[in-house]
């Protein structure tokens, strides 16, 4: 059974079909596959990711996770089923330490209430050891453990991306959706990001990654979908899709 199946998905904003009938399949076995989603600006990639991750509702079509229709589920229910996406660390969260950011990422926490506790410096010491241990493991995986007590706002762009990834890991995901993980990340940090994602995939976590940096896509993704004008233009290995003249034309804005 496929891990994720997107069937005839559509999303309209007024008269604009941002997603115009998309089918997409992520295989269930073997685990730990990294699938790329590329395409020119405005192709509908982020909209598609938003729908799969429960941030937005589709106008039509279905999303199945391991055979179950998840189209109407809110994000925390999706997380409980193993599907998570990363979010940029917001300004509010930037005031908190790296470790506190992870503790806040846990499921079934009333974020706001906890945020207030943290904001008033009353981080409850009797927080379960288990949560801190999970956070520690997540930070070790992304190599940020030594920065656990630093305010998130002081991290570099690349370190913030790693923190976003580690927040997703707190939910013990099966499938992680990433929207441009390498955007604004310095080359040296990019290597670390790539290694980290690879390491997580080796442990069985699947990824669907939107990325404009094609070197990153080439390094990570076995299978690549190409979107243009709301539709899947083609799919295949990185070499196959980038060798396809329709893909080149879509990027250059020419008519296929
Ligand atoms: N909330 C919204 N309201 C109206 N139009 C939207 C909204 N979100 C996206 N769009 C439009 O839908 C289209 C697809 O946008 P989307 O952000 O999904 O593209 P993308 O492939 O992620 O592009 P990029 O590579 O630049 O991030 C664009 O024309 C965009 O302007
Ligand atoms: Mg986008």
Image: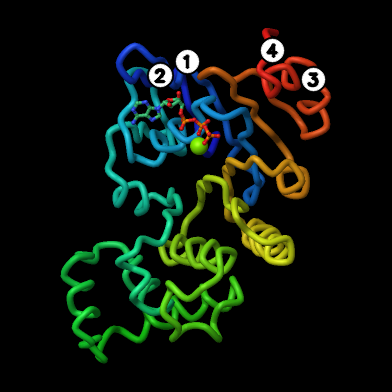
As drawn, the label of residue 21 is 1
Q: Secondary structure at mark 4?
A: loop
State the image coordinates of residue 21 (x, y, percent, origin top left): 47, 15
Q: In front of the other: label 1 or label 3?
A: 3
Q: CA distance from mark 1 to mark 3?
A: 21 Å
Bin the neighbour count of mark 3 within 10 Å (Cα to Cα): few under 14, some 14-19, many 20 and up: few
Q: Secondary structure at mark 2?
A: strand
Cα distance between the residues tagged 3 and 2: 25 Å
User: Which numbered mark, 1 or 4, is in the foreground of this view?
Assistant: 4
Q: Earlier in the sequence, mark 1 or mark 4?
A: 1
Pointer 3 or 2: first along the chain: 2
Assess whether mark 1 and mark 2 are in contact (beta carbons under 8 angstroms).
Answer: yes
| Nearest the eye: 7 or 167 | 167
Q: Earlier in the sequence, mark 1 or mark 3?
A: 1
Give the Cα distance between marks 4 and 2: 24 Å
Q: Quadrant of residue 15?
A: top left
Residues at discs 4 and 3 in contact (Cβ within 8 Å): no
Pick whichever of labels 2 and 1 is earlier in the sequence.
2
Which numbered circle lies on residue 244? 3
**Residue farthest toward the bottom in the current orientation of the protein:** 125
**Which of the pair 235/80 is nearer the observer?**
235
Earlier along the polypeptide chain: callout 4 or callout 3?
Answer: 3
Q: Are marks 4 and 2 in contact (CB under 8 Å)?
A: no
Q: Which mark is residue 254?
A: 4
Q: Nearer the viewer, mark 4 or mark 2?
A: 4
Cβ of mark 2 under 8 Å from ligand 1: the answer is: no
Disc 2/disc 1 C-alpha distance (Å): 5 Å
- Seen at 59% across and 51% down, the residue is 183
Dot label at residue 10: 2
Mark 1 CB lies closer than 8 A to ligand 1: no
> Are the two marked residues, 1 and 3, in contact with CB atoms closer than 8 angstroms?
no
Up the image or down, 128 lies above or below 51; here it is below
């Amino acid at each position: 059974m496929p891990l994720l199946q997107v069937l005839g998905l559509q999303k309209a904003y007024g008269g604009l079909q941002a997603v115009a009938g998309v089918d997409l399949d992520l295989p269930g076995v073997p685990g730990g596959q990294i699938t790329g989603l590329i395409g020119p600006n405005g192709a509908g990639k982020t909209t598609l990711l938003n729908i799969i991750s429960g941030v937005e509702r589709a106008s039509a079509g279905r999303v199945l996770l391991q055979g179950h229709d998840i189209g109407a589920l809110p994000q925390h229910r999706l997380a409980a089923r193993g599907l998570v996406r990363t979010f940029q660390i917001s300004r509010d969260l930037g005031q908190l330490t790296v470790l506190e950011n992870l503790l806040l990422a846990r499921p079934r926490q009333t974020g706001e209430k906890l945020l207030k506790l943290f904001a008033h410096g009353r981080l409850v010491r009797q927080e379960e050891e288990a949560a801190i241990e999970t956070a520690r493991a997540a930070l070790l995986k992304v190599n940020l453990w030594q920065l656990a007590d630093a305010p998130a706002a002081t991290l570099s762009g690349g370190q913030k991306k790693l923190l976003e990834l580690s927040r997703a890991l707190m939910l013990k995901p099966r499938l992680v959706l990433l929207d441009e993980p390498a955007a604004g990340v310095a080359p040296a940090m990019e290597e670390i990001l790539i290694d980290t994602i690879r390491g997580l995939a080796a442990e069985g976590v699947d990824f669907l990654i939107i990325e404009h940096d094609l070197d990153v896509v080439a390094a990570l993704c076995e299978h690549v979908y190409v979107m243009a004008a709301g539709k899947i233009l083609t799919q295949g290995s990185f070499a196959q899709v980038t060798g396809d003249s329709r893909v080149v034309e879509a990027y250059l804005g020419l008519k296929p």
